[in-house]
Amino acid sequence: MSFKISCQGATSIKTFVDFLWNKLTPAVSNTIRKKMAPQIAGDMRATYPAFSGNRSNLEKHILSSLAQEENFNNYWQYLHNPQSFFKNYIENQIKSYCSDKGSEKMKTFLKMSLDAIKNDILSAIHEATEIAKDKRSTASGWLDLFCDKLRNMEFLKEAMCKALDPEMNRVEQNCLYMPVDEMVPEIQKMLSEHLSGCWKQCPCCRAICTNTIPTHDGDHSVPFHRPQAVSGISWYKTNNFVLDYCTSLVASDCFLVLDNDRHIPYKNYRQAGGDYAKWSITPDTSAQPYWKWFVCHFRSKLEEKYQKRFIGKGKIPDEWEKNHKTECA
């Protein structure tokens, strides 16, 4: 790439050096930011257990975090807008990682990037000077024009090298105190790509498909379903929550009732068509204690949000009350 630089009106090499550094410094800062983003993303994958595996692993850590917080509004967002919730969770973890501007890791990444760029610039200064001295060499357009105007190449090299350290120090300070938000989107994008997957939710309990390919072939599936009360489903013509898990319902003689009052045996749930036909739900009577604890702990919130009740067929079994958060999380 050739650069056309006019040196007309320049009365000294210092004038040109100042001009050149004014152009170089912003580019150096941008380069460092681009280098640091993948370094931070890589370190977070290596040191944060939530980011060390696939999205299913991340979801386990999110569910544990939600249980520790006991914030129903956060649960509600996770259940009804999981993709947005995951994105916000990742962003918050990045901000937490970067919040300490003086952290040793941030300083190490910055120093590594600065040293590499400094060496590149020094090498370019020396190489450009030698090329400019060689009348027989073919230089880029800007260097040819510059060499026609300035004869004292050694003084130019000295002036450029002398200005290098102060400029690098200025870049370092700017990078150390730059707003974290400037780097977060790029880091978030890198981590999200590493943790990609399908976002389809079970039409009955809102469990998220665990396939790691966003547009995968075949059925959607999850290793564990949830009580259908979590997604607000009630028994037919009642306001009683359904506490059964999807896996136990497909093993039962119960019926799935659609909006058009069409009744389909849960065992043949795929006949309902639409999303139901695209899910693989294996009959199983076992159930995770996590969502039992969730239902017990947030029963009043769930009743308020869905305008349904844990009474009648939806009465919470006494044994569910024995599930403790510490065990579930």
Image (spheres, grey):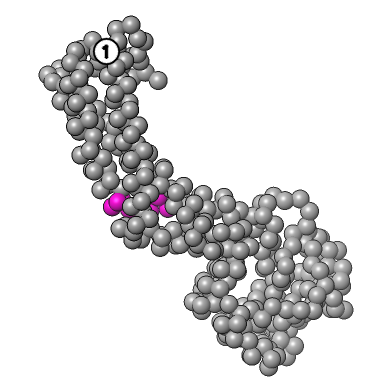
Disc 1 packing (10 Å; few <14; some 14–19; many ≥20)? some
In magenta, the rendered stretch is: 176-184
Residue 198 point in image, percent of width and height: 66, 56
Q: Secondary structure at mark 1?
A: helix
| Closer to the camera in the image, 176 or 288 | 176
Q: Is residue 40 left or right of residue 101?
A: right
Residue at left offset 70%, top offset 57%: 211
Task: Name the residue at 36% across, 10% down.
Answer: 138
Query: What residue sits right under mark 1 in the picture?
Result: 133
Please provide percent x and percent y for residue 84.
54, 60
In-front residue for pair 243/303: 243
In this rendering, the count of numbered labels is 1
Q: Position of residue 224 (x, y in %)?
A: 71, 71
* Quadrant hosting residue 82: bottom right
195 or 147: nearer the viewer: 147
Image position of 211 with respect to 147: above or below: below
Q: Residue at x 76, y 50 (%)?
A: 217
